[in-house]
Amino acid sequence: MIPFLDLGASYRELKPEIDTAVSRVLNSGWYILGPEVEAFEAEWAEYCGAKHAVGLANGLDALILALRALDVGPGDEMIVPSNTYIATWLAVSAVGATPVPVEPDAATHNIDPNRIAAAITPRTRVLLPVHLYGQPADMDPILTLAREHGIAVVEDAAQAHGARYKGRRIGAHGDVVCWSFYPGKNLGALGDAGAITTNRPDLAGRIRVLRNYGSRVKYVNEVPGVNSRLDPIQAAVLCVKLRHLNNWTERRRAIANLYSKELADSGLILPHVPDWADPVWHLYVVRSLDRDRLQRRLTEAGVGTMIHYPIPPHMQAAYAGLGLAPDALPLARRLADEVLSLPMGPQLAMANAGRVIAAVQGAAR
Ligand SMILES: *Cc1c(COP(=O)(O)O)cnc(C)c1O
């Protein structure tokens, strides 16, 4: 059996290093914020090419606090991809604003910059692109539109650790970049964790205050904040794993290259990589008109797959209130019916990737 993803494998690979780091924190007696969190923030900011990083409890909070720091809320509109994980939309709802979905580019599945202008209204305050599957969104036209209209850009980079757009790492193209270190992400903690990166000291400072009860000085509360602090144990784990991230990305890339080469004649639609994109292959997503059958046959052949994502946000009960018919966003709906994610991860052996390819070729026939 080849699982879609073996979550314990990255821990087993680094067990001595991680165990040492965790016991260092346990023995330090310092369990909230402090030196471990500060060390990771400095390393993560540097890795991302950003001036500031702020460690948070998870990726959804990173998005929510980024929006709160921009002072947006009820009555405001935010442009989100129609094809994304629902967390992107939930952050907009959490601050009381309205998500305005824009359809993807059919080749990359990322938000189509050519469709954004038509969705901008006088109420639009934020453009919220997502670097889906580890593939950067087309940032230059997005940043140009934002500048022209005086709109902020918040990036959902929860799947894009280390990805590059036109040679430069994701981390500070927009106003704030939001990260998740959920265990299954390319850089994953051993529990929930998240962060923001930014070049704007004002936003970094506001998010730092918001994550800690709205307080800079203990028992002095400037704003109604929340408790969303990165756990020092997770920060220590992330520092260890960060040293291996580039190597792990290379292994993902080798698997993706093999899939793309060997499945070129399979009849499936394979991922398209624009020449300005340097993706990190969080997911390797193929499209099939007969997706459910393909998935069934792969399961029978012992190959685990996943669907990212089976129900688009606009068709979820959570968003019934927006009154969007399923076909209001036909591309998002179609992708949900056709996409399939093949096994992918740094610990997936090349021999097993070869077995996945053979199973896909057998199943597609
Ligand atoms: C994982 C993910 C999130 C949410 O991150 P959590 O840490 O699970 O809260 C947000 N957006 C996208 C695109 C994600 O993949």
Image (spheres, rainbow, N blue to C red):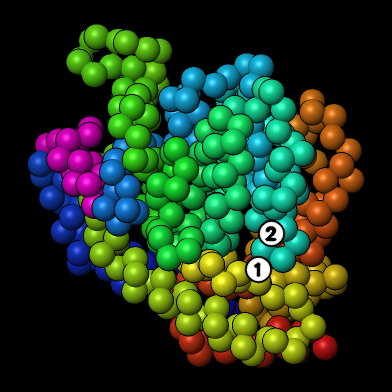
CA distance separating discs 1 and 2: 10 Å
51 on left or right of 120: left
Q: Secondary structure at mark 1?
A: strand
> Quick one: quadrant of the N terminus?
bottom right
Q: Nearer the viewer, residue 172 or 54?
A: 172
Q: Which residue is mark 2?
A: 109
148 on left or right of 205: right
Does residue 142 show up?
Answer: yes
Name the N-terminal-most of marks 1 and 2. 2
* Displayed quadrant of residue 36: top left
What residue do we see at 30% from left, 32% from top? 201
Q: Is 187 placed above or below 53 here?
A: below
Q: Secondary structure at mark 2?
A: loop
Q: Which residue is mark 1?
A: 285
What residue do we see at 57% from left, 65% from top? 283
What residue do we see at 37% from left, 40% from top? 198
Magenta span of residues: 29-43
Q: Dot 2: few (<14), some (14–19), or many (≥20) neighbours within 10 Å? A: many
Q: Position of residue 19 (x, y in %)?
A: 21, 59
